[in-house]
Image (cartoon, rainbow, N blue to C red):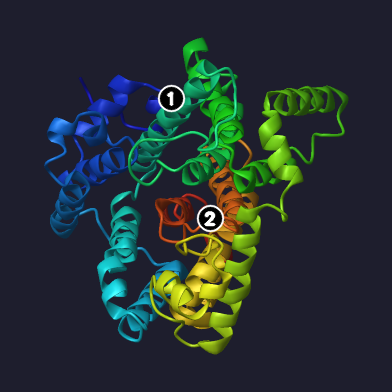
Amino acid sequence: MEAPKTIDDFYVFKVKNMWAYFKGQHFSFWMICLYLFFEFVRPQALFPAIDIIPWAQLFIMGALIGAVVDPTVKHVKSIANIYVITFSILIIISVFTAYYPEVSKKKFMDFFSWVVIYFLITRIVNTKERFYIFLLIFLFAAGKIALGTAKSWAFRGFGFTSWGLMGPKGFFQNSGELSILMVMLFPLAFYLYQHFKAKAALWERLILMAFWVCPILTVLGASSRGSQLALAIVMAIMFRKSIFRIKSLIGVLILIVGLVYLLPEEQKERFRATGDDKTSQQRLLYWENGWEMMRDHPLDGVGFFNFVPYFERYYSEDMLYKKAELPHNIFIQVGTDAGFPALFLFLLLILYCIFSSLKLTKLLPLSDLSRVIAAGLGVGVLGYVIAGQFVTVAYYPFIWIHLSLIVSIVSISKSSINSQARKWSN
């Protein structure tokens, strides 16, 4: 079979064409795609017999080796690179200046692996065709989790449980982290559905619809108040321009009524008790004392992942449970880990994601798929920031994978908008 010549041969899910293209790509692209598949789908958790091999690390090493010899891999010029490198240096400093350096050193790879993955993705995923295939792996991997968890909630009668919903073993097993993935998947899947629905086959439309409906159901069933709030704000932003049209308004009202009806009464009670329940009180103490830690150690924090032992030693009177936890806030996490300079860089990375996506949506025509993808990724990052005010996920895949995708699509799109490329600042 002759390999397809343009990305148009892939839409929407032309598996044979994509497979023909994939087979002809360099080893480095195979490895980075396999890494993403094993990180998100985690077949090693489904089949314990193959879990004896560190698959994710193996594919990262393969991608590193492949990137050295892949002639298409080139340096991607972006201000985000400077932010990532500077942030990494500050994290390294915080490891060696930590109150408990042994804790920091054990946790260091929880962050540093994302630096490696960021630079691999941005350099290897460097054409529209590669980007589309890589994005679909992410979409189907996250969509598979959404389908499975939404099905679990439906099968238990849309009822409430204290643990919410559980994803596959790994980054998304906990209901809070699972919900954030769903909040970030929803806008991307919805915008893709809107873009393709007029020209997609029925089965393709149904898959795309499932990929944005199931995340909503999962967020409702996962009992994570922060993610439910984030989803509500994300939806308000996405539908802000059409909400006053009669047809759209009716649809939005039906959706709101349906969501409120599906939300378990126990979860509604949790919202009413926000600020007064023991969980909320403990988080408020984490934030209050975390801010004090940052003020006492403004330049380098108390040390990478040192929040828990530091809190247990110096704020034991504010422990409402037997053990302290991480601060349940991405900004408090980074600030206490490495101080205000690191927090500033972290904010710059987030702002880069949001504003670069916004710039793409303004520079590219409405019919351009890259514009649609950029919008979905940018809104997803905004959802992450909102939900991240209640969960400790600064070093989880969320921001780092989206950052990599945004840098890649910006780099790819710059070469396609020709005369308008000069409007970009690297």
Note whether 9 is above or below 329 in the view shown: above
Q: CA distance from mark 2 to mark 1?
A: 23 Å
Q: Is residue 175 left or right of residue 109?
A: right
Which residue appears at 42% of the width and 31% of the height? 145
User: Which quadrant of the structure image shows residue 420?
Assistant: bottom right
Which residue appears at 22% of the width and 35% of the height? 44
- Nearest the viewer among 171 and 155 is 155
User: Which quadrant of the structure image shows residue 11?
Assistant: top left
Residue 45 at least partly seen = yes
Q: Residues within 10 Å of mark 2 (few under 14, many from 20)?
A: many
Q: Position of residue 14 (x, y in %)?
A: 37, 21
Residue tagged 1: 148
Q: Residues within 10 Å of mark 1 (few under 14, many from 20)?
A: some
The residue type indicated by label 1 comes to: Gly
- Nearest the viewer among 389 and 422 is 389
> Please, what secondary structure does the residue beneath circle 2 have?
loop
- Quadrant for the N terminus, please: top left
Residue 200 at least partly seen = no
- Nearest the viewer among 144 and 422 is 144
Q: Position of residue 64 (x, y in %)?
A: 18, 57
Q: Is residue 147 left or right of residue 241?
A: left
Q: Is residue 255 left or right of residue 87?
A: right
Note whether 412 is above or below 133 in the view shown: below
Q: Position of residue 132 (x, y in %)?
A: 39, 37
Q: Could you tell which of marks 2 and 1 lies nearer the N-terminus?
A: 1
Q: Position of residue 232 (x, y in %)?
A: 70, 41
Residue tagged 2: 391
The residue type indicated by label 2 comes to: Val
Which residue appears at 33% of the width and 44% of the height? 170
